[in-house]
Image (cartoon, rainbow, N blue to C red):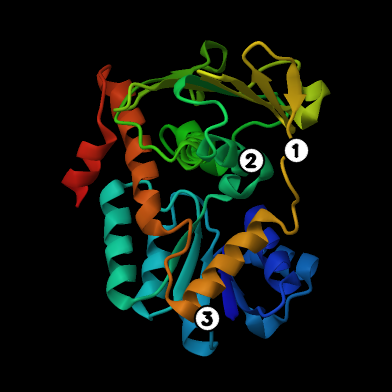
């Protein structure tokens, strides 16, 4: 599989390394409109000058390829995806697929009409803890779930990137997109209604969102809450400045996920450490393998654009709820966008 990587920031450079290190894949070209970034990445990654381009169309016209990885800034995903799909190429795009639900629906429809895969890089689905929780829930270990709580905190040394700060509600699109998608994946259920609050820290002049709080309601009676907070002091001294916690309360006991640790606390029993399972490959390699398999067989990838539409509807519901101070139904937004 010959791959073009569009966008050579830190994430794009990670993809270049993944492509080079994955058997059966070949780096066809790299693209970045920023000449300085292109030169710097070329030196850091020892890229061949004749395989470096400032525009994706030039690369597509001059280099044979089977797929494009879109790793541009999060507000510039739509055009490169459209350019690749128009040529009948497979696409693996970093989250979010688009900042506009209608644009995402159009990309998914285009991919389906052309019979080519569109994979969204929701790599949190492929980390070990979410996959272990999904397995335990599918096996019915906790029984019926009444409520879950999910929280993420980051320290001051992990601020929002400048590219994210330029996007309204950047915190939602940069990190909440990961966790809300992972919650969908773990529970196998779609939140029916959400109520959200997006806040800015008063001490930075309200220039950027620093926290998001979301209440989620499901048709089966389950409820949940999600909270993300940046600039939370103290976490810089352990776990590289980040803390993640998930509590899933069921009729038979409670599951706890704290960063790398997964505990099962049965009702009336003692806490038991649960193995998360092996990690035979990186999450990026897993996604790349999904793309290759879909190109080869035509089967829909696990993290397809079609599946990802509900995650985007959930994010748009959060943004609307915060602005309008009301409960919003993601499903209704998705139906309207279609």
Disc marking residue 275 = 1
First of labels 3, 1 by sequence position: 3
Asked which quadrant contains residue 26, the reply is: bottom right
Q: Determine if residue 55 is in view.
A: no
In percent of the image, x 77 and y 68: which residue is there? 45
**Disc 3 element:** helix
First of labels 2, 1 by sequence position: 2
**Does residue 63 lie above or below 101 as drawn?**
below
Q: Quadrant of the N terminus?
A: bottom right
Label 2 crowd bin: few (<14), some (14–19), many (20+), radius 10 Å: some
Asked which quadrant contains residue 261, the reply is: top right
Q: Describe residue 284's horizontal placement relative to residue 306 as left or right.
A: right
First of labels 3, 2 by sequence position: 3
Distance from Cα at disc 2 to Cα at disc 1 = 8 Å
Whether the residues at callouts 3 and 1 have beta carbons within 8 Å, the answer is no
Disc marking residue 59 = 3
In percent of the image, x 53 and y 35: which residue is there? 137
Residue occupied by mark 2: 132
Label 3 crowd bin: few (<14), some (14–19), many (20+), radius 10 Å: many
Whether the residues at callouts 2 and 1 have beta carbons within 8 Å, the answer is yes
Q: Determine if residue 318 is in view.
A: yes
Q: Describe residue 182's horizontal placement relative to residue 336 as left or right.
A: right
Position in image of residue 276 (x %, y %): 72, 40
Position in image of residue 113 (x %, y %): 27, 73
- In this rendering, the label closer to the viewer, 3 or 1: 1
């Amino acid at each position: 599989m010959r791959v073009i990587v569009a966008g050579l920031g830190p994430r794009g450079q990670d993809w270049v390394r993944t492509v080079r290190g994955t058997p059966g894949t070949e780096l066809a070209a790299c693209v970045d409109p920023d000449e300085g970034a292109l030169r710097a990445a070329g030196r850091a990654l020892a890229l061949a000058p004749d395989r470096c381009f400032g525009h994706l169309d030039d690369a597509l016209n001059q280099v044979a390829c089977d797929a494009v990885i879109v790793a541009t800034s999060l507000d510039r995903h739509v055009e490169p995806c459209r350019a690749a799909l128009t040529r009948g190429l497979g696409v693996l795009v970093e989250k979010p697929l688009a900042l506009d639900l209608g644009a995402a629906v159009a990309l998914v429809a285009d991919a389906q009409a052309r019979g080519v895969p569109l994979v969204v890089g929701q790599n949190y689905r492929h980390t070990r803890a979410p996959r272990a929780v999904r397995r335990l829930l599918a096996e019915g270990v906790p029984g019926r779930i009444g409520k879950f709580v999910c929280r993420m905190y980051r320290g001051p040394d992990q601020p929002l990137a400048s590219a994210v700060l330029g996007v309204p509600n950047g915190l939602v699109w940069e990190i909440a997109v990961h966790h809300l998608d992972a919650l969908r994946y773990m529970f196998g259920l779609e939140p029916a209604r959400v109520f959200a609050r997006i806040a800015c820290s008063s001490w930075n002049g309200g220039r950027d969102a620093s926290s998001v709080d979301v209440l989620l309601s499901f048709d089966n009676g389950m409820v949940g809450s999600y909270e993300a907070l940046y600039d939370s002091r103290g976490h810089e001294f352990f776990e590289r400045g980040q803390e993640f916690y998930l509590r899933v309360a069921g009729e038979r006991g409670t599951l706890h996920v704290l960063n790398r640790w997964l505990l099962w606390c049965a009702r009336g029993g003692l806490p038991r450490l649960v193995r998360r399972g092996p990690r035979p490959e990186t999450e990026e390699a897993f996604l790349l393998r999904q793309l290759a398999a879909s190109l080869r067989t035509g089967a829909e990838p696990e993290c397809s654009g079609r599946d990802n539409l509900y995650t985007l509807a959930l994010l748009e519901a959060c943004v609307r709820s915060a602005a309008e101070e009301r409960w919003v139904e993601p499903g209704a937004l998705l139906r309207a966008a279609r």
